[in-house]
């Protein structure tokens, strides 16, 4: 048996396995409600339109209602000059048959080394094995009422209290920051 040949084959197989795992891990996660929310926020901060489309379940051009949302969020992150994102926590606040209401608490990495805390919520739908961010037109008044109750409970919890504390600390250290962002957004139009 040719040992060097066998070692070479094993090395090539291991490299192929590593490459396949890396390529798959670079993709978005739409296999869970929290995964699609994490992927969306990361894609928006990084400006990855392909991933954003996957999160909304869109092929081709964005429908106008999604286009406006995506454009607004990308301008918002640009106004912060975000260099990255770090997810602190992400979980379901409400879950029903084929939908979930998900919060995400994350920090935007800023150029000066600071982190800007954010909390957002998303309605997530499910198609077979994949989850997608629901469009505003898909959210009924009944769902709005249920999510308002779930968000109220969330605001009483530790995650939200930690977010508020971190946000307040950031704003105290950076007076005028919100105005700076609003000015940058108004310039961007």
Image: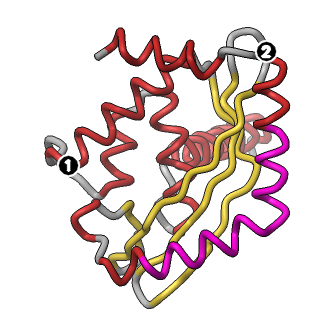
Does 160 sit above or below residue 145? above
The CA distance from mark 1 to mark 2 is: 34 Å
Mark sitting on residue 113: 2
Q: Residue furthest bottom?
A: 97
Q: Is residue 157 magenta?
A: yes
Q: Residue at x 48, y 20 (%)?
A: 182
Q: Which residues are magenta?
A: 145-166
Q: Is residue 140 left or right of residue 28?
A: left
Does 143 sit above or below residue 46? below
Q: Is residue 133 magenta?
A: no
Q: Is residue 5 visible?
A: no
Q: Residue at x 33, y 76 (%)?
A: 127
Quadrant hosting residue 159: bottom right
Q: Residue at x 43, y 66 (%)?
A: 123
Viewer-proximal residue among 49 and 114: 114
Q: Could you tell me residue 152's position as x and y percent? A: 64, 71
CB contact under 8 Å: marks 1 and 2 = no
Q: Is residue 156 left or right of residue 80?
A: right
Viewer-proximal residue among 136 and 14: 136
Q: Can you say which quadrant of the picture contains the C terminus?
A: top left
Does 113 sit above or below residue 65? above
Q: Is residue 4 left or right of residue 165?
A: left
The residue where tag 1 is placed is: 65
Q: 10 Å neighbourhood of mark 1: few (<14), some, or many (≥20)? A: few
């Amino acid at each position: 048996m040719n040992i060097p040949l066998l070692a070479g084959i094993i090395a090539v197989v291991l490299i192929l396995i590593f490459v396949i795992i890396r390529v798959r891990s670079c993709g978005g996660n739409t296999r869970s409600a929290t995964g699609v929310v994490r992927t969306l926020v990361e894609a928006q901060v990084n400006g990855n339109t392909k991933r954003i489309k996957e999160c909304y379940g869109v092929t081709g051009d964005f429908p106008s209602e999604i286009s406006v949302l995506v454009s607004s969020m990308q301008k918002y992150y640009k106004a912060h000059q975000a260099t990255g994102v770090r997810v602190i926590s992400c979980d379901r606040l409400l879950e029903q048959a084929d939908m979930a209401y998900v919060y995400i608490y994350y920090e935007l990495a800023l150029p000066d080394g600071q982190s800007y805390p954010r909390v957002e919520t998303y309605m997530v739908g499910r198609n077979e094995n994949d989850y997608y961010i629901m469009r505003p037109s898909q959210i009924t008044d009944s769902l709005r009422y249920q999510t308002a109750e779930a968000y109220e409970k969330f605001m009483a919890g530790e995650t939200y209290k930690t977010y508020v504390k971190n946000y307040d600390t950031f704003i105290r250290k950076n007076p005028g920051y919100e105005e700076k962002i609003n000015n940058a957004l108004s310039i961007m139009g």
